[in-house]
Amino acid sequence: MVGLQYDDIMKIITKKILKEVYKPRKKDSHKYDYGHLLVIGGNKKYSGSPAFASLAAYRSGVDLVTTVAPERAANIIATFSPDLITIPLKGDYLKKEHLKVIDTKNVSAVVIGGGLGRKKETLDTVNKFLKNLDKPCVIDADATYAVAKNKKVLKNKPFVLTPHLHEFYVLTGIEIKKMKLKKRIETVRKVALDLKTTVLLKGNPDIISNGKETSINKTGNPYMTVGGTGDVLAGILGSLMAQGVEPFRAACAAAYINGKAGDLAAKEKKVALTASDVIDKI
């Protein structure tokens, strides 16, 4: 960070972001006042990803989470906690026929991608779903591979992409790993501007941009390379958007919260840290 000059469109995220996104609740608040999040993910092999996202979403303040996953994954997820509502889809992976049973009418926001896998039919189904979606959405993990084939589904919608370095390459064809930070920041900003969406590039630091505003997040640590911490981030982000926080601000806050929770967990666990430990510290 030494010697890097920050301009007017870019700032470092601090804990002040928490007061921006978490307002005092009214005494007469009711269920659904603070959102209903739909999490779509998983396949026959992977059940942990949508479970982590769903549990992290609850810890971040959303009122209700519904998790939709292929049958085996949904049934496993239901055993994790009585807080979780699951809807099982017939079969081993997401298919186009499932779109008729995935209801978004009464949800506030969506998280899609974790553990879905990359079968062609699944990726095509993701794109068809996103094309018709008008709700805020976190596009994570395998869903990134879908939109890389059809970026038009992103433009001018309240979506946030959450790629790590390789997924950013899949999405853009740009190798960003060896770039100096200043160049990396400008690249993320330009991609967000071109795609007309919000991008949260996971890394050290995280870079968040909607093409107009750009911020970096410095919370987080090397112990968070363990599987599942990205799913936790997606769940926090989806929760905030379901509560009505606009995409860029929600992405900034989610990056800060996820990293800070990871820092608290790392003080105790170090190399033994797991995604569940991060959720416990939210």
Image (spheres, grey):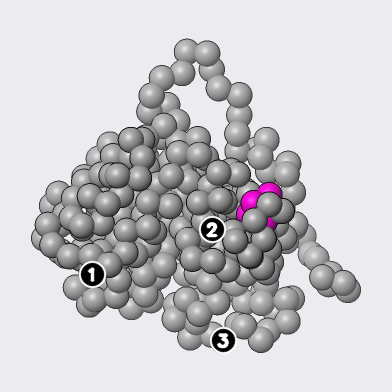
The x and y percentages for residue 273 are 59, 59
Q: How many marks?
A: 3
> From the viewer's perspective, is residue 236 above or below residue 229?
above
Q: Is residue 27 above or below residue 195?
A: above
Drawn side of residue 131 relative to residue 28, left or right: left
Q: Mark on residue 175?
A: 3
Query: Is residue 166 covered in magenta?
Result: no
Q: Residues within 10 Å of mark 1 (few under 14, many from 20)?
A: many
How far apart marks 2 and 1 lie (CA) works out to 28 Å
Considering the numbered disc 2 on the image, is that residue within a helix, a strand or a loop? loop
Q: Residue at x 24, y 76 (%)?
A: 119
Q: Which residue is mark 1?
A: 122
User: In the image, what residue occupies the spot 56% across and 50% down?
Assistant: 277
* Separation (CA) of disc 2 from disc 3: 29 Å
Mark 1 or mark 3: name the one nearer the start of the chain: 1
CA–CA distance between discs 1 and 3? 26 Å
Tell me the quarter of the picture where residue 85 sits: top left
Instruction: Give the farthest residue toward the right.
Output: 3
Q: Dot 2 corresponds to which residue?
A: 274
Q: Secondary structure at mark 3?
A: loop
Q: Amino acid at mark 3?
A: Glu
Q: Amino acid at mark 1?
A: Thr
Q: Is residue 282 above or below residue 126?
A: above
User: Which residue appears at 82% of the width and 70% of the height?
Assistant: 1
N-term mark: 2 or 3: 3
Q: Is residue 265 magenta?
A: yes
Q: What span is in magenta?
A: 262-266
**Front residue of 126 and 55:** 55
Single out the mark in the foreground, 1 or 3.
1
The quadrant in which the C terminus is found is: top right
> 225 or 123, which is in the foreground?
225
